[in-house]
Image (spheres, grey):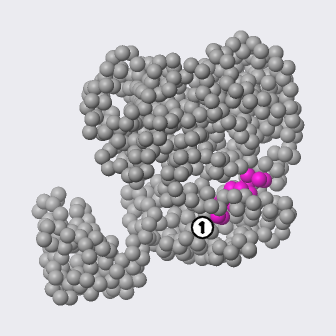
Amino acid sequence: MRPDVLNPLFAETETLEGVGPKLKKPLDRLGLTRLRDLVYHFPERFVTRRAVGTIDEAGQGEQIVVKLLVIEHRGGRNPRAPYRVLAQDSVGNVLSLTYFGRASYTAKKQLPVGESRWVAGKLERYGDMMQIVHPDHVLEEGGDTLQRLCEPVYRLAEGLTQPKVAGLVEQALARAPELPEWCESGQVEREGWPAWREALRRAHGGEDAAARDRLAYDELLANALALMLVRADNRQRKGQPLKGDGSLRDRLALPFPLTGAQTRSIAEIEGDLVQDTPMLRLLQGDVGAGKTVVALAGMLIAVEAGAQAALLAPTEILARQHYESLRRLAEPTGARVALLTGRDKGRARESTLMGLLDGSIDIVIGTHAIFQDKVGYRNLAMVVIDEQHRFGVGQRLMLASKGRTAPHVLAMTATPIPRTLTLAQYGELDVSKLDELPPGRQAIETRVVPLARLDEVAAGVERHLASGQQAYWVCPMVRENENDDTAAAEARYAALKERFGDDVVLVHGQLAPEMKDAAMERFARGDAKLLIATTVIEVGVDVPKATLMVIEQAERFGLAQLHQLRGRVGRGSEKSTCLLLRGDQLSETARDRLALMRETQDGFRLAEEDLRLRGGGELLGTRQSGDSAFQIADLDQITRLLQVAHDDARLLMERDGGLEGKRGAAARVLLYLFERDFGVKTLRGG
């Protein structure tokens, strides 16, 4: 059970003053559903303002607070024209307070002619007049504005304003309880860290590195502890030792010989499977490195030993693709392979369920449907999870209840992860690496093209499609607002549909899953020739005839992501091309990134370089695609603090008696605070 002291933090945002159904919607869009989410919704930056007596004292572009007398309102007839309120400072300098759109209603209310107001905002020049566009604050008395000389700027969704979010955060902080100290006292003193509640207050109040570090460390420590508990629990569980005799694997007819890396990984898996503690291994392989064959070899070992194996895929399309390729590969071995997804109904479903129960099906492939309560197995002893990041440790524990004993787990990921971060995301797994490409794979030609040559690119795509090939066109990610992603993709789709008609399909995150699946399937079958998408296509789909990838505004993506997207092509024997369309304004980092993409196709090298190029300030490439293990710790903090947190977690487990004792009890609170309580649950036997 969650400790009572945390209850105030897990209360819904509706319990705050001023939050009704209308405000709840934008809060939900930002993922702010509980007070806990609000206290951790840190400002993206801070605005520092200066109080001035007259505008002569301020420079252009400066954030100021100044007292003004309102002299005239101009505008109102044309709703598109700006609405201007003229005001003067104490020595008679006139400036314009400028509003656009519906904000003019606010201006009329807040700025009556003949009265003085304190105004906060950014001073700019427009023609020969100074102006402040959409002032941040307009108040009758200066007190409050003058106290806000350093003000947080939060990420917003439509329907929210900065003052509104700041007010809600303030309410949530006021209700936050004092929590026991889970950090080691020596560490707190050495770093000069404030206590948890004080750290939160400071992180919202201004640029406070010690407070932010402490809060990031809390998250890293919670993660390390949970992973250690799962690992320790795994060691105590009994697995089923699986010793294969090679009879099925010898019959595999592979299109080309195994690489050294594949042979090594299979041997590591085989070594794990003969133990009686369940395997927890991560198979990291670059796009196209042949992970599927390695996974199949592992599953066949289980079948040779008289047990069953399952492969869990993140989407229905991927499950079908795995099924097709594994069934083809496994055919000569005689192992029986079945598919089970949420879509399967009626007799077909019944017969699959019976086959799993009586053991006549050896290997099942599917989505989460394969672990529903109604699905029983005769002897499930091994589970392969594709695209590890979509499945939390909690789901892995759920798997453990399906077999007679805890099943062996092999997780596969095509995202090459830098060494520093492997520990963070997969601290409790052993790692096998596929760092060689199978023979016969051609390098993908990568070119960087200015966006200004868009017409030539579209003509090139037309020639490409006419030759019977298929292509992807990926639209940029617009971070501020996910709806803009959709807008960018939809605009490009509309333009290209005019040119190519029904040969074009569109896929983005806002589409209903069945529409997304239907569009992907049309493309996979070859009925559609061009797939326009946001980054949702990063993971998975295998379309051998797709040999051209166009990535628009490539400078906006991290290296890891560009590499993942490029890996969607080059799947067949044909030569493939990737065009990176770049804007005019390129930062030094973006230039380096695009140059590296041209230079190498080694995902592991790109992952390390990505880490180096991004430095501390920028978010992880994995964070952008939603699979970072962390919400609070940024890259710089992970690099500096992760090892310390890991060592501290180990110390707590080994020296301080785990979660017993005073610090152990505080650590339990920490695990529940970060919803890593699956770690605590392992202590009670799952």
Viewer-proximal residue among 184 and 96: 184
Image-based side of 613 in relation to 416, left or right: left
Q: Is residue 645 above or below residue 547?
A: below
Nearest to the observer: residue 12 or residue 285: 285
Q: Please say if 267 is above or below 27.
A: above
Q: Would residue 355 be visible to someone looking at this image? A: no
Kind of residue at badge 1: Asp
Residue 450: name its quadrant. top left
Is 561 situated left or right of 293 in this image? left
| Left or right, 203 with reference to 235 | left
Which portion, as a residue range, is magenta?
Answer: 217-229
Where is mark 1, residue-wise? 213
Looking at the image, which residue is at 43% across and 50% down?
A: 589
What is the quadrant of the N terminus in the image? bottom right
Report the number of numbered marks.
Answer: 1
Seen from this angle, which residue lies furthest top?
332
In terms of secondary structure, where does tag 1 sit?
helix
Query: Percent position (x, y) of residue 424?
Result: 66, 52
Say which residue appears at 56% left-offset and 59% top-offset. Answer: 636
* Residue 335 rendering spot, x and y as whole percentages: 75, 16
Magenta portion: prevailing SS class: helix
